[in-house]
Amino acid sequence: MKSLLVIALLILLNAGPVYARWEALEKQYQPTGLETLYFDPDTIHQEGTRATLWQLTDLKWNSTTRFLSFKTRKEFDCEQSRVRILQVVEFSRQMGTGKSAAGYIENGSWQPVEARKLNHALWKAACGKR
């Protein structure tokens, strides 16, 4: 019985943290350089003609600020092909880990979704476009 308890404890300790299901954007939407862009399909929420999701920007190295990744919550207008940033959260470590610092919440500032750009890929995912 004692050995079963030890085994169960070891399994729990090795389970590790639970992460979001970040999916890398297709290669043509990735910027060249020291960052990789992801989105979490589990965070897509559609309401009427609007949809929101979370994007993760993971930096391989950053000499200008104290953060190595940041999450951005974006809202898409699926009918009018527009996007706006709702929230940004910066993280001291890669893949949205470490200490976090709330960025900002923006009201308004809709931008057009440009074809073959990052937000176009996210718009397709959020709005269910193929």
Image (cartoon, rainbow, N blue to C red):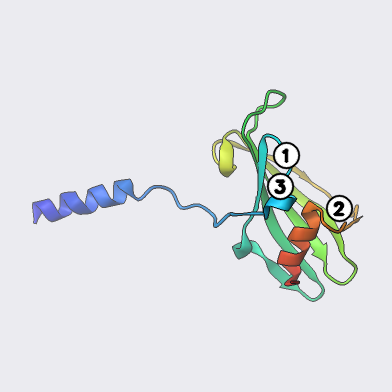
> What residue would you read off at disc 2?
107
> In the rendered structure, which amino acid carries the disc numbered 2?
Asn
Whether 48 is drawn above or below 22: the answer is below
Q: Which residue appears at 76% of the width and 72% of the height?
A: 129
Describe residue 89's horizontal placement relative to residue 77 as left or right. left
Describe residue 43's horizontal placement relative to residue 14 as left or right. right
Q: Is residue 21 visible?
A: yes
Where is residue 121 shown, x and y percent of the image?
A: 75, 59
The label shown at residue 32 is 1
Label 1 Cα crowd, 10 Å radius (few <14 / some 14-19 / many 20+): few
Q: Which residue appears at 62% of the width and 63% of the height?
A: 41
> In the rendered structure, which amino acid carries the disc numbered 3?
Gln
SS at mark 2 in the image = loop
> In the rendered structure, which amino acid carries the disc numbered 1?
Thr
> What residue would you read off at disc 3?
30
Q: Is residue 90 visible?
A: no
Res 50 quadrant in image: bottom right
| Dots 2, 1 in contact, CB < 8 A | no
Residues under labels 1 and 3: Cα distance?
6 Å
Between disc 2 and disc 1, the foreground one is 1
Q: Which residue appears at 63% of the width and 34% of the height?
A: 68
Sequence-first tag of 2 and 1: 1
Res 33 quadrant in image: top right
Residues under labels 3 and 2: Cα distance?
27 Å
SS at mark 1 in the image = loop
